[in-house]
Image (tube, helix red, strand yellow):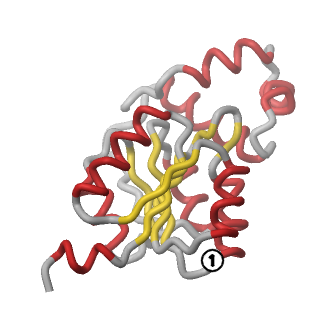
Amino acid sequence: MSQNLACVNKRILIIDDEDHFAQVLTRSLVRLGYQTSDVNSAEQAIKIMQEQVFDWISLDLRLGQESGLNIIKRLHEINSEARIVILTGFASIPTAVEAIKLGAFNYLHKPATVKELIQAFEGEKSATEVAIEETPMSVERLEWEHIQRVLHEHEGNISSTARALGMHRRTLQRKLQKHPSRN
């Protein structure tokens, strides 16, 4: 059986608040023969999951001011068989580990290719295989990791996280808008 015939049966839901990225990914997957739908919020994702069955779900880690981690459990309650791959431009070891613990099948850093995404869905479940770099992280990266961990502990609440970190809410928002340092 050719790959195109095998993928015709796969339905993919793309949950990403970056409309352009979601549209490009959708077009690429459709060209490969996959059936896709895309939404840009947690609410829309829950709604469409209640109406349709998806085999694979590409879930952005940050959906506006929300964390994609917060809806993994709900998505699995609706469809426990769906494989969820977290796809994010804000990758960190703590969020990768947390995503896998919550039931994500895999975790990829943007920009990932369509081929990498498909391999993440088809591969074996990640057993929290997060590559730990041999060189120490920069102070900026450590700060980013800590902010992400505290943000997750406060369920994505910016004000609560800012209070816990002892910083002004606007300062925290500016830090969250920056991409993390790679090292």
Around disc 1, counting alpha carbons within 10 Å, would you say few (fewer than 14), some (14 to 19), or many (20 or more)? some
Judge whether 129 appears above or below 55 on screen.
above
Front residue of this view, candidates 158 and 112? 112
| Residue at numbered disc 1 | 79
Could you tell me which quadrant the N terminus lies in? bottom left
- Left or right of residue 160: residue 17: left
Element assignment for label 1: loop
| Image side of residue 144 versus residue 115, left or right | right
Q: Residue at x 53, y 32 (%)?
A: 142
Give the residue type that dot 1 points to. Asn
Q: Position of residue 160 (x, y in %)?
A: 86, 32
Name the image quarter holding the C terminus. Answer: top left
**Quarter-wise, where is residue 157 in the image?**
top right
Q: Residue at the spot x=32%, y=57% of the render?
A: 117
Return the residue nearer the eye: 166 or 69. Answer: 69
Q: Position of residue 147 (x, y in %)?
A: 65, 33
Task: Name the residue located 70 percent from the left edge and 20 percent from the top edge.
Answer: 172
